[in-house]
C-alpha cells in the first residue's frame, strides 16, 4: 500500500476523532457556529505569522491562527456585551471581516512575491491529500492532548453544558472551564483547517455531534459516538478520495459525515424519523380505537338510563349513530376502525335489513369500560379538584384519557374514593345524548 | 480616476448597496447567519446548473442558486422542528451543500469553467472587461447591469410589501395576528437573499457578499432607530466600504473584495465606538455627564 495514503488516512482519522469529541461539547454548549467563525478568523493569523517569520513552518502558523481566532472570539463577546447587536450578527461580522482581512493579506503576500508562499492558501480548502509524516506526528500529538483533556475534564464540561449555575454553586471555576473548552475548540479548529479548510471546518465539529445526539440521551455515549462518527468520516473521506484522481479529501470527509447524519436522522431508534413516525401512527391508531369503543359504550349506556351497562342485556345500535351519517366527515376512517375492531372480536357487526347494527362483545365491553372509566375519572377529578363546570370537562378528558397510566388511574381512584364517589364506574357527569364528533 | 476604477467602484457600491439593503432585514430578524449559509449553499445550485445545462449563461445559474437558497432555509427550519438546535442545523445544512458543490466542481473541473477561488473571492478586478453587448454595441460591464437589475428588484419587492416586511421583522407574532402570512414573507426574503447573493457572487465572490449582507446593516443599526433610515444608511455605508476598499486594495496591491470587507469592518468599528446614540464611548460620556449632574444636584 502507498505509504503516502497511510499518512493521509491516519491524519484524517485522528482529526475526525478529536474534532468529533470536542464538537459534542461545542454543540451542547450552543457554540456550534463558533467553529466556523474561528476557522475564518484564523486566516489573518496564518498570513501574519508567515509575514513575520517568512517561513512556512507549521507550528508558528498554527500559533498565529490560534491567536487571531481567539481575538475573534473576544471581539464577538465585546460586540454583544457593549452594543445592542445580537450574537448571530456579531458572529457574522467577525467571520466576514476577519476573513476579508485574511484574504487581503494573503493576496498582498502573493503579489509581493515573497519566496515560498505557495501552500499558504491550502489552509483555505485543506490539504488532507498532501499530509506527510511530519504533519501527522504534530496532529497525533495534538489530537491525543485533546482527547485526554476531554477525558480529564469530562465532568466539568458536563456541568458547563447542562447547568452552569449549579457548577458555580458547587464551587467550580466555571469561567476558567469555559475558557478551557474554548481553547480546546480553537485547537481542534486550527488542526482541522489543514484537512478540510476554512469553510468546511464547521462541519467537522457540528455534524458528527448532531448525528450522535440522535442515538443516545447520555453525554458519555454521545461524546464517544461523536468521536467515532468523526473518525469514520475521516476514514471514508480518505479512502474514497484515493479512488479517483479528482476527488478532494476534505469535502469528501464532510460528505461522509453528512451521510452518517442522514442515516441517524432517519433510522435512529428513538429520535429518528422512522421511529417517530411509527410511534405517531401507533398513537393515532390507539386513540381512534379507544374513541370508537367509548362511543359505542356510551350509546349502549343511553339505553340503560345511566346506571351502568350489563354485558348480558346489550341492545344493538345502528352503526351510523357511532360512525356518523353517510356524508359526515371522518366516517370512512371510523368505519375502518370499526371493521378492525370487529375482526379482533371486540365489536359485533350485523346487517339487519338495510342498516348495520353494532354491539360490544364481552371482551369489547371490558376494553370500552377501561377507556370510559379513565375518561370519567378525569372528568370527576376536574369537576371536584379543579372546580370546573361539568359541561367544560369533556374535551380535556378526551385529550388525556388515552395517556393515563394504570398507576395514575389507581391514584385517581383512591383520591375519588375519599370523596365517596360510588360504584367502580360512574355515570357521565354530563348528558350523553349528542354525538361528540 | 479613470473609467476602469469607476466601473469597479460603482459595481462594488451596487453589490454593497443591495446586500446591505436586504441584509438589514436579516439582522433585524436574527437571521444573519442564514445569509451566510445561503451564500455557501448556492454554490451547489450554480454548479448543478452548469452541469445540467452545460451553459455559463446567467439565467440557469440564478434558478439553481435560488432553488438551493430556498432549500437551505427550508432544511434549516425542518431540522429545527426535528429537534436540532438552530445554529447546528444551519451548520450541518450549508456545509453539506457546499461540500457537495466543491466535490462536483473538482470532479467535473474539465467541463465546468468555474474556478473555486473565483467563486469564493470573486474577481471584481475583471468586471470592467466583461462587457454586455446589445447587438454590437457595448453598453457597459455585465456585472454592473446584473447588480443594477437585482438592486431594482430588491427595492421594488421590499417597497411593494414594506409594511409587511416591517412588521414581520420586528414582531412576527403580531404580524401573524394581523393575518399576514409570516412564512410566505420569510421565504420571499430568503428568495431575495439568494438572488442578491448569487448576483453578488459572480462579481465579488461569496465572502464579500456575506460581508456586505451583514456588516453595513449592523453599522446602520448602531446609528439609527428608524427602519427607513437604517435601510438608507446601510446602502450608504456599503457604498463607502466599496470605494474605500478599492482605494485600500490598490494601495496594498491586494484582493479588492477582501479590502472592501476589511473597510466595512473598520466602518463598523467606528460606529461601535462613536455612534452618537449607541456608541460605546458616547454612552460612557453620557453616563459621566449624568453622574456630574447628579453630584451637582446633591451639593
Image: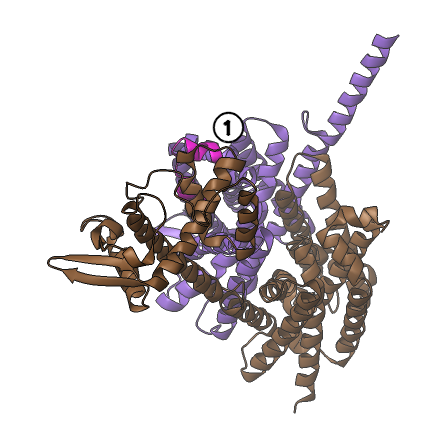
**Magenta stretch prevailing secondary structure:** helix
Nearest the viewer among A155 and A397 is: A397
B96 in the magenta segment: no
Q: Which chain is brown?
A: A
Whether residue B34 is visible here, answered yes or no, is: yes
Residue A16 screen position, x and y as percent: 67, 71
Residue B32 screen position, x and y as percent: 57, 45
Nearest the viewer among A208 and B252 is: A208
Q: For chain B, what colour was chosen?
A: purple
Q: Mark 1 lies on which chain?
A: B
Q: Left or right of A337: which side holds B29?
A: right
Q: Residue at x 49, y 52 (%)?
A: B77
Specify start and end residues of the magenta stretch as a single range. Answer: B172-191
Q: In which quarter of the image is the N terminus of chain A?
A: bottom right
The residue carrying pointer 1 sits among few (fewer than 14), some (14 to 19) or many (20 or more) residues within 10 Å by Cα, namely few
Q: Which residue is drawn at 31% across and 67% down?
A: A345
Q: Residue at x 56, y 80 (%)?
A: A240
Which residue matches tag 1? B228
Count of numbered tags: 1
Is B245 placed above or below A407 here? above
Q: Left or right of B276: which side holds A354?
A: left
Q: Left or right of A155: which side holds A437?
A: left
Amino acid at each position: 500500500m502507498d505509504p503516502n495514503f497511510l499518512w493521509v488516512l491516519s491524519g484524517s482519522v485522528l482529526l475526525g476523532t478529536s474534532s468529533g469529541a470536542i464538537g459534542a461539547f461545542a454543540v451542547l454548549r450552543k457554540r456550534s457556529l463558533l467553529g466556523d467563525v474561528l476557522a475564518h478568523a484564523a486566516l489573518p493569523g496564518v498570513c501574519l505569522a508567515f509575514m513575520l517569520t517568512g517561513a512556512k513552518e507549521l507550528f508558528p502558523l498554527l500559533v498565529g491562527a490560534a491567536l487571531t481566532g481567539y481575538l475573534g472570539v473576544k471581539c464577538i463577546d465585546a460586540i454583544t456585551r457593549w452594543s445592542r447587536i445580537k450574537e448571530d450578527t456579531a458572529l457574522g461580522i467577525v467571520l466576514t471581516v476577519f476573513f476579508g482581512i485574511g484574504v487581503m493579506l494573503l493576496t498582498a503576500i502573493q503579489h509581493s512575491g515573497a519566496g515560498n508562499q505557495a501552500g499558504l492558501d491550502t489552509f483555505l480548502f485543506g490539504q488532507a491529500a498532501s499530509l506527510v509524516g511530519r504533519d501527522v506526528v504534530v496532529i497525533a500529538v495534538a489530537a491525543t492532548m485533546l482527547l485526554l483533556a476531554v477525558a480529564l475534564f469530562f465532568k466539568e464540561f458536563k456541568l458547563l453544558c447542562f447547568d452552569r449555575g449549579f457548577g458555580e454553586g458547587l464551587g467550580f471555576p466555571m469561567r476558567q472551564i469555559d475558557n478551557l473548552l474554548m481553547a480546546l475548540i480553537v485547537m481542534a479548529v486550527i488542526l482541522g483547517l489543514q484537512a478540510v479548510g476554512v469553510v468546511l471546518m464547521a462541519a467537522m465539529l457540528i455534524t458528527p455531534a448532531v448525528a450522535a445526539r440522535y442515538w443516545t440521551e447520555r453525554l458519555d455515549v454521545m461524546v464517544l459516538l461523536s468521536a467515532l462518527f468523526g473518525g469514520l468520516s475521516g476514514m471514508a473521506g480518505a479512502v474514497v478520495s484515493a479512488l479517483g484522481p479528482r476527488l478532494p479529501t476534505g469535502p469528501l470527509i464532510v460528505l461522509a459525515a453528512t451521510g452518517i447524519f442522514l442515516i441517524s436522522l432517519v433510522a435512529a431508534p428513538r429520535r429518528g424519523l422512522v421511529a417517530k413516525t411509527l410511534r405517531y401512527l401507533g398513537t393515532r391508531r390507539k386513540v381512534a380505537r379507544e374513541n370508537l369503543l367509548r362511543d359505542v359504550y356510551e350509546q349502549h349506556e343511553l339505553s340503560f338510563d345511566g346506571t351502568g351497562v350489563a354485558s348480558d342485556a346489550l341492545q344493538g345500535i345502528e352503526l351510523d349513530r357511532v360512525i356518523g351519517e353517510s356524508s359526515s366527515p371522518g366516517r370512512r376512517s371510523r368505519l375502518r376502525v370499526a371493521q378492525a375492531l370487529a375482526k379482533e372480536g371486540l365489536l359485533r357487526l350485523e346487517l339487519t335489513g338495510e342498516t348495520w347494527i353494532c354491539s360490544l362483545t364481552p371482551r369489547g365491553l371490558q376494553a370500552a369500560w377501561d377507556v370510559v372509566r379513565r375518561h370519567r375519572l378525569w372528568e370527576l377529578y376536574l369537576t371536584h379538584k379543579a372546580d370546573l363546570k361539568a359541561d367544560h370537562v369533556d374535551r380535556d378528558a378526551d385529550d388525556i384519557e388515552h395517556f393515563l397510566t394504570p398507576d395514575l388511574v389507581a391514584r385517581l381512584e383512591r383520591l375519588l374514593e375519599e370523596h365517596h364517589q360510588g360504584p367502580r364506574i360512574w355515570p357521565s357527569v354530563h348528558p350523553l345524548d349528542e354525538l361528540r364528533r | 480616476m479613470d473609467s476602469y476604477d469607476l466601473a469597479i467602484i460603482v459595481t462594488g457600491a451596487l453589490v454593497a448597496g443591495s446586500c446591505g439593503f436586504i441584509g438589514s432585514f436579516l439582522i433585524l430578524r436574527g437571521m444573519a447567519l442564514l445569509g451566510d449559509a445561503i451564500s455557501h449553499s448556492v454554490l451547489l445550485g450554480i454548479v448543478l446548473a452548469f452541469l445540467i445545462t452545460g451553459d455559463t449563461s446567467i439565467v440557469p445559474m440564478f434558478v439553481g442558486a435560488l432553488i438551493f437558497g430556498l432549500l437551505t432555509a427550508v432544511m434549516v427550519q425542518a431540522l429545527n422542528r426535528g429537534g436540532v438546535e438552530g445554529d447546528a442545523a444551519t451548520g450541518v445544512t450549508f456545509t453539506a451543500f457546499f461540500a457537495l458543490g466543491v466535490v462536483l466542481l473538482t470532479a467535473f473541473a474539465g467541463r465546468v469553467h468555474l474556478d473555486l477561488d473565483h467563486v469564493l473571492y470573486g474577481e471584481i478586478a475583471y468586471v470592467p472587461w466583461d462587457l454586455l453587448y446589445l447587438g454590437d454595441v457595448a453598453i457597459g460591464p455585465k456585472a454592473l447591469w446584473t447588480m443594477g437589475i437585482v438592486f431594482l428588484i430588491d427595492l421594488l419587492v421590499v417597497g411593494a410589501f414594506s409594511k409587511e416586511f416591517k412588521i414581520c421583522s420586528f414582531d412576527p407574532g403580531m404580524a401573524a395576528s394581523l393575518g399576514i402570512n409570516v412564512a410566505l414573507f420569510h421565504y420571499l426574503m430568503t428568495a431575495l437573499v439568494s438572488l442578491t447573493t448569487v448576483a453578488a457572487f459572480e462579481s465579488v465572490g461569496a465572502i464579500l457578499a456575506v460581508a456586505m449582507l451583514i456588516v453595513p446593516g449592523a453599522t446602520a443599526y448602531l446609528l439609527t432607530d428608524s427602519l427607513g433610515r437604517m435601510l438608507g444608511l446601510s446602502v450608504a455605508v456599503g457604498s463607502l466600504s466599496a470605494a474605500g476598499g478599492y482605494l485600500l486594495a490598490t494601495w496594498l496591491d491586494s484582493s479588492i473584495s477582501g479590502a472592501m470587507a476589511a473597510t466595512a469592518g473598520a466602518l463598523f468599528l467606528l460606529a461601535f465606538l462613536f455612534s452618537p446614540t449607541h456608541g460605546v464611548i458616547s454612552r460612557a460620556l453620557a453616563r459621566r455627564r449624568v453622574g456630574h449632574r447628579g453630584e451637582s444636584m446633591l451639593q
